Image (cartoon, helix red, strand yellow):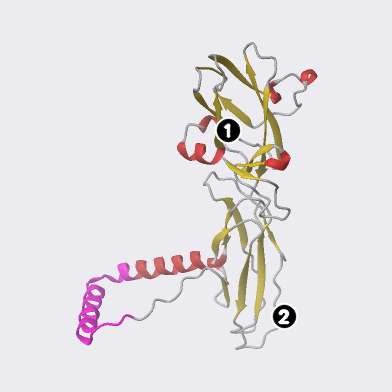
Amino acid sequence: MNQKKTRPTTEPDSFLQKTFVVSENIFDFGPLLIGKDSEQRESEEVKRVNSTFFQITNNGKYDLEASFVLKSTLPVEEGGPETKSPFIIEPAEAKLKVDETLNLQVFAFPEEAKLYKDEIICLIKDNPNPTILQVQCLGAQPIVNVDQETVKFERALIGKKPKQELVLTNACSIPVNWKLTGVGELPEEFFVTKTTGLPKPPAPKKESRAGSKKEEKQVLERANSMTSEQRKEIEEQKALNDLRIRTSGRLDPCKSETIEISFNSLKEQKFLENIKLEVEDVENHGVKQEEK
């Protein structure tokens, strides 16, 4: 189990992952995507992200019987909360021989973007003193902020290429995927691209003249064997891949991405165009932010 004496005070360092914070006496699952189905908890990927184990060992001289309950399952009059807890514990009870260890599995499935806290109460038969383990998790929803909603180009002389920038910032506690849609439908005067994470052009290969000529001949033969439809399909696919690389990416918590929009003034004309920002979780559960 990971441990920290104290929680860092600044984000994103304060977003711990499956860590016991000694100063708070609490186990923190950290930020977890909201809206996941707890019925899917047998999935290995779900277990990896949404569960952990607490080792319960019988260090006594006799065999014991233990049961485990969440404080949140208690009636309100007995100290239970009024809202539903995202935590699940398995198994609910166990018999342990001397020196035997049980892996108590604990899941967390937050439904809302907020902080949840609960207590695991371990009751041992014939022992009046329960053991209490405090747990918490932070429900998180994909959110990316944009520094401006309208990009306005003033009058531009024909032949000039003014540029404007948009800044996307991950305002939530989990990584997100983002993409700009509608860019492919913009008039030819507009060019949109992110400024980081673009592939570098390949370095020129050092080959002998004979090897270079042989490769050129093979490329030429493949090109000549293609139909016009195949060439068109390849060019369209290359254009789509280039567009995807330029207008999508991943943002970690508190990180930003700059989008550069350039306008090439070709003729006298007014433009009023729209593009949309789509933001989604990186776990492919389809949890999205409202379109911008």
Residue 97, horizontal then vertical, whole percent? 50, 17
CB-based contact (under 8 Å), mark 2 and mark 1: no
Would residue 2 be visible to someone looking at this image? yes
The residues tagged by marks 2 and 1 sit, at their Cα atoms, a distance apart of: 54 Å
Q: Residue at x 36, y 66 (%)?
A: 233
Is 169 in front, or is 133?
133
> Which residue corresponds to mark 2?
154
**Element type where label 1 sits in the image:** strand
Q: Amino acid at mark 1?
A: Phe
Is 262 in front, or is 74?
74
In the depicted structure, whether residue 205 falls above or below residue 111:
below
Would residue 272 be visible to someone looking at this image? no
Residue density around tag 2, few if under 14, some if 14–19, many if 20 or more, within 10 Å: few
N-term-proximal mark, 2 vs 1: 1
Give the mark toward the camera: 2 or 1. 1
Q: Quadrant of the C terminus?
A: bottom right
Q: Is residue 103 left or right of residue 238?
A: right
Q: Is residue 80 left or right of residue 43?
A: right
Q: Amino acid at mark 2?
A: Glu
Asked whether residue 238 is drawn in magenta, I would say no
Q: Residue furthest right?
A: 77
Q: Quadrant of the N terminus?
A: top right
Question: Which segment did they paint magenta?
Answer: 205-231
> Which residue corresponds to mark 1?
107
**Element type where label 2 sits in the image:** loop
In the depicted structure, whether residue 121 falls above or below residue 52:
above
Q: Residue at x 49, y 66 (%)?
A: 245
Residue 106, horizontal then vertical, whole percent? 58, 31
Q: Is residue 127 left or right of residue 221?
A: right
